[in-house]
Amino acid sequence: MSKKVAIGGDHASPEYKAAIIEHLEAKGFEVKNYGTNSLDYPDFAHPVAKGVNDGEFERGILICGSGNGVAMTANKYPNVRAGLCWTKEIVTLIRQHNDANILVLPARFTAKQQVIEMVDEFFSMEFEGGRHQNRVNKICI
């Protein structure tokens, strides 16, 4: 897996985003921060999703208050599978069963330590393939 990661977050997430960046860089990841602290989540969700979609980054992380807006934006890209997670167990499943390549975090509904644990899970889990591959192949129409 590539150690290049794209990240973006809105005004609800600067503390979380900073903690994630620090954590990933300490683990040897190269993190590209697409900002922002603005109210307009598409402004940072699009460049993160485009970078993953185009293969510049193998994986990305998006954070906003609920996570829904950035997930909806990112999932417009054909090669993106952005999964909204609020527990480590959900992170495991989006990686193993859905081959998610963008982790979406709801800043207003998670604790900072919980987010760090979810980020670690996202980068440690691999896609299981097999029967799940057929399902992933059916996502894009």
Image (cartoon, rainbow, N blue to C red):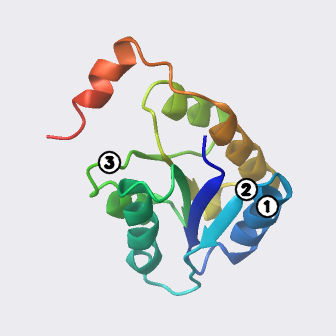
Outermost residue, right side: 26
Which residue does the numbered mark 3 point to in the structure image? 79
Q: Nearer the viewer, residue 108 or 38?
A: 38
Sequence-wise, which precedes: disc 1 or disc 3?
1
Q: CA distance from mark 1 to mark 3?
A: 25 Å
Can you tell which quarter of the image residue 13 is in? bottom right
Give the x, y percent position of residue 111: 76, 56
Name the residue at 50% across, 19% down: 128
Residue nearest the observer in this picture, 122 or 39: 122
Which of the marked residues, 2 or 3, is nearer the chain's N terminus? Answer: 2
Q: Quadrant of residue 53?
A: bottom left
Q: Amino acid at mark 3?
A: Asn
Q: Which mark is residue 29?
A: 2
Separation of residues labelled 2 and 1 (CA atoms): 5 Å
Q: Quadrant of the N terminus?
A: top right
Q: Residues within 10 Å of mark 3 (few under 14, many from 20)?
A: some
Q: Front-most of 58 and 103?
A: 58
Residue 59 at x, y percent in the picture: 53, 50
Q: Which residue in the rendered view is the most extreme toward the top?
A: 131
Q: Amino acid at mark 2?
A: Phe
Label 1, residues with CA under 10 Å away: few <14, some 14-19, many ≥20: some
Q: Amino acid at mark 1?
A: Glu
Where is residue 99 drawn, in percent x and y?
45, 33
Q: Residue at x 28, y 19 (%)?
A: 134
Q: Are marks 2 and 1 in contact (CB under 8 Å)?
A: yes
Q: Count the marks.
A: 3
Q: Is residue 19 above or below residue 99?
A: below
Placement of the C terminus among the 4 image quadrants: top left
User: Label 1 belongs to which residue?
Assistant: 25
Image position of 128 with respect to 26: above or below:
above
Residue 112, quarter of picture: bottom right
